[in-house]
Amino acid sequence: MTSSSLQNLRVAIVGAGPAGIYAGNILTTTVTAVGGSVEIDLFESLPAPYGLIRYGVAPDHPRIKGIVNSLHEMLDRSSLAAHRRDTRFIGNVEVGRDIALAELHERYDAVILATGAIRDASLDIPGIDLPGSFGAADFVAWFDGHPDVPTEWALDQREVAVIGNGNVALDVARILAKHAVDLRSTEVPDNVLAGLEASAVTDVHVFGRRGPADIKFTPIELRELGEVPNVDIVVSDEDFAHLEGLTPANNQLKVMLRILESWRTRESTGASRRLHLHFYHSPVEVLGDARVEGLRFERTEPVGDGRVRGTGAFRDYAVQQVYRAVGYYGTPVVDAPFDEKAGVVSNVEGRVTDASTTGDADAPVIPGLYATGWIKRGPVGLIGHTKSDAMETIAHLVADVEAGRLVAPTLDEDVLDLLDEREVAYTTWDGWLALDAHERSLGAEHVHTRERVKVVPRDEQVGISRGALVR
């Protein structure tokens, strides 16, 4: 690798969540290590950075703070006095609405799409669209204070169901079952705290199609579930019959099975809320006429290698709300090729292609357009996986630069001038620091002292952020 072709490189990254920030950091480190130079503009449709970390993780996960601190350091490296960092954050700007993808190509050597997957995957069963049936992503966005969802959520039913056996399902179930008093110390927004305090929920049922040996939780998530105050965990002996003689495939599974087994023998404490874990249940239909009244499942049984088959036995459960947590689906980027089947931007190892089928090595590559994170490979893996994912994409980008495969920008002008001309109320890193300080001050002043209280309305976030605007 030489620095001659890596001088004055300009790159736009669309999405300021972990995937986009990691990609920018890896690109900067790679280029500067050989004496090159790069300037990166990190575009985000929300006024604040961090994406999934701020708006997709339950507020009672304090260990996430370490990831936030790491991302913060990556964006806060350079001097304020320079008024221009090697990486700039440009928030409250939606590509495809405020600025076109083609206009980014005119101003940058390369564009990296890191927009993630924020929509719920579909669950194609009768009744899934009845009132009272929700996608988990929408509920997560509500309790995380996302500015683009309603500020109120009806928690007026006693028995609710969560379909799914992954960490998102567990987060949703835990927040539904948890008493609001136990969330007062977190950064949960005030409107969410008020909604949870008024909750009528007494029983939360979590349904998984496979058995206890095939759950997608992590041991930490599972252990936390059993530590929720004044909530009893209820499991059924019949769901563990297939585990006799089973040798766990790894230590992680061994720990989780030990936790589940301990719940089988734990006596009820008479808690005011209960969290029921059901295995070997495949959803068949949401029951009800005008709204959700129940769920019908077919019992399943294992056939090996984590696969299950239906038994022909059906069971109905009386629930009044349903939350599907069966995965996420990518949001198309305007004017970028999208693979509808896979729910990702069409690409081969991060190089965006014209083909509608991801992974087609023969598909023509679009010069200078790349993807990373969930919009590249789908919503699989933990946050840490985005680092190795970004490394692959950045390696291809650098190789393309050195091979002369990119098209040079045709406009030598600051993109902020275009946004100013269009009166786009963009936010900056200085604005985020102001908003961050404001939220922390609200937490310090709160009747229950908290690290922060999130500001929810978009216009309020933008107003606070733009009050600190520096060009």
Image (cartoon, rainbow, N blue to C red):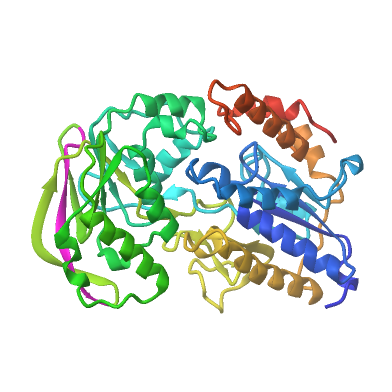
Instruction: Give percent across and percent down for residue 415.
Output: 79, 44
Instruction: Give percent across and percent down for residue 226.
Output: 34, 49
Residue 130, visible in the rendered structure = no
Span shown in magenta: 291-304
Q: Residue at 58% across / 62% down in the picture?
A: 384
Q: Residue at 15% across / 35% down in the picture?
A: 289
Which quarter of the figure is the C terminus placed in? top right
Instruction: Give percent across and percent down for residue 70.
Output: 68, 53
Judged left or right of residue 424, residue 59 is left
Which quarter of the figure is the N terminus placed in? bottom right
Q: Residue at 55% across / 48% down in the picture?
A: 52
Q: Is residue 450 magenta?
A: no
Residue 102, visible in the rendered structure = yes
Q: Nearer the viewer, residue 422 or 59?
A: 59
Q: Nearer the viewer, residue 66 or 261?
A: 261
Instruction: Give percent across and percent down for residue 268.
Output: 21, 44
> In which quarter of the view is residue 137 placed?
top left
Q: Nearer the viewer, residue 428 or 423?
A: 428
Residue 271 against residue 368 in the figure, above or below:
above
Q: Residue at 26% across / 64% down in the picture?
A: 210
Residue 359 against residue 417 in the figure, above or below:
below
Judged left or right of residue 133, residue 349 is right
